[in-house]
DNA sequence: GAGTACGAAATCGTATACGAAGACTATTGC
DNA sequence: GCAATAGTCTTCGTATACGATTTCGTACTC
């Protein structure tokens, strides 16, 4: 973005952005111990703003904080994943339904283009790229949501998910095909100005189907984590 | 030893609880200017923990914070109210549906008792008491929600609402009667182990009906469809 | 040899202090 | 008389410092 902005922004802000970036891009992997003094030194600031940044990240659920002990990057605990996805399915479904009436033909075209890329991506499957495109696609759908609170919840959910980096679809490649088809179906619903209820249900099911696929996968075989 | 739990908790925690309490109980009314140094002195701590407490409250939406300017108690901006209620209708609906299968006969009985009190309360209408009971009632319904994230979102929503103190029903007394009836209907659905979809929709409509009543009342006209 | 107790190191929590940014006020020029 | 500007004053933002708490290692005892 603008590195000049980081200079004008408060130190807390800088620290927040820096730590968050490192969590999301995987430099700090789950379980990583976040020591205030060390981070402060790395960023060339004192511990106070770092502390504030950590607490903000805690509120977002990206780090876990224990009093008098310290902070660690929040784990990808499968249970947590389940909860996050379920929550996201609900709020994203609502956000998509609310923003649907505000989605114009131009937006639909953009979304369709992204989905075409995704379909193409299926050939020589790249889970990371696919997951990225997936986020782009859904962003177009829910970004017009007029209720900022709901939109914020959706963003938080995606952030949480991003911290289990790379890709959901790495674990459930089969799901990717269905996903692309469901995207097209969703777009059709939006184009035809379907009922909010119908759109909401479709968007929610779309997400919880991915969750179900993941659960079926991890329950069936050995857990490949660790 | 727990009566002085505030002593064992961290200063930040104390400050957080103290400020939050004053916002909720109305000592600090909306727009009230929260000056760090003053609060710190009142509580007998330094500004650092107070600052942290304020930021936490900001994350919850109870206070509005402006860089280099200060914090004020978040207003009851009607638009904010609308957003909060809409969000709550969605997450509370989901939470209620998810917890419905876990609600036992004892819980239903308790809820019914609370609702009976509410009905009684209608005679010599006390909006504050009614609103309190209303929260108790709904708490019983969603508190078993197995997804802690969703449950947390519900609590936050209620907190926000609590900060526009006293009572929603002060503004829409007529709505109170319908509310009690809808509560009974909700309980019947839960008892009969109705579909999650049905329960969710009922719970959501129950809340958005209150919102609509409020909107109709305050605008006395109509707002654009949402 | 294993378990416990004591002590040292690491890290967090909070206080105090100083610098910076914005808001208010008084004064001056038009 | 009104507006613009300069100066002051309040309040926030961050650094540094010290006390509190936890954890880990080591030695001692059973």
Image (cartoon, coloured by chain):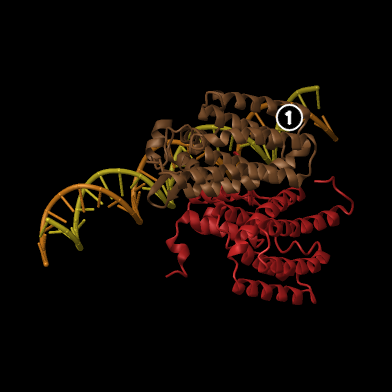
Chain colours: A brown, B red, C yellow, D orange
Residue at screen point 79% across, 76% down: B124
Left or right of A81: which side holds A134? right
Task: Give whichever of A85, B117 is nearer the camera.
Answer: A85
Residue at label 1?
A108
Q: Chain of mark 1?
A: A
Q: Secondary structure at mark 1?
A: helix
- Asked if residue A14 lies left or right of residue A32, the reply is right
Q: Is residue A158 above or below residue D27?
A: above
Q: Nearer the viewer, residue B199 or B150?
A: B199
Q: Position of residue B9 (x, y in %)?
A: 45, 59
Q: Residue at x 59, y 48 (%)?
A: A87
Residue B84 visible in the displayed image:
yes
Q: Position of residue A173 (x, y in %)?
A: 52, 34
* Percent position of residue A105, x then y: 78, 28
Asked whether A215 or A32 is in front, the reply is A215
Question: In screen coordinates, is D18 left or right of A90?
Answer: left
Q: Position of residue B132 (x, y in %)?
A: 68, 68
Q: Which residue is at a point 69% across and 46% down the rendered structure image?
A: A201
The residue carrying pointer 1 sits among few (fewer than 14), some (14 to 19) or many (20 or more) residues within 10 Å by Cα, namely some
Residue situated in front as seen by the camera: B2 or B213: B213
**Picture quadrant of residue D12:** top right
The part of the image, by quadrant, that contains residue D20 is bottom left
Q: Quadrant of the N terminus of chain B?
A: bottom left
Q: Residue at x 46, y 67 (%)?
A: B4
Q: Tell me, yes or no, if residue A148 can be seen here.
A: no
Give the vertical position of A182 relative to B87 (above or below): above
């Amino acid at each position: 973005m603008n590195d000049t902005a980081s200079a004008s922004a408060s130190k807390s802000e800088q620290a927040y952005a820096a730590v968050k970036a490192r969590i999301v891009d995987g430099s700090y992997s789950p379980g990583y111990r976040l020591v205030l003094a060390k981070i402060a030194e790395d960023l060339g600031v004192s511990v106070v703003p770092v502390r504030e940044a950590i607490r903000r990240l805690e509120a977002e659920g990206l780090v876990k904080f224990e009093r008098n002990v310290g902070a660690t990057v929040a784990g990808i605990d499968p249970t947590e994943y389940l909860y996050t996805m379920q929550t996201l399915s609900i709020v994203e479904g609502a956000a998509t339904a609310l923003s649907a009436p505000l989605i114009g033909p131009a937006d639909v075209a953009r979304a369709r283009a992204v989905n075409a890329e995704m379909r193409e991506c299926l050939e020589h499957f790249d889970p990371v790229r696919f997951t990225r495109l997936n986020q782009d696609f859904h962003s177009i759908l829910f970004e017009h949501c007029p209720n900022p609170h709901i939109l914020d919840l959706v963003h938080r959910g995606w952030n949480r998910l991003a911290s289990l980096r790379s890709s959901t679809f790495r674990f459930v490649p089969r799901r990717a095909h269905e996903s692309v088809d469901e995207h097209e179906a969703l777009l059709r619903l939006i184009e035809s100005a379907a009922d909010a209820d119908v759109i909401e249900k479709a968007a929610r099911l779309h997400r919880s189907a991915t969750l179900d696929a993941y659960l079926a996968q991890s329950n069936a075989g050995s857990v490949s984590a660790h």
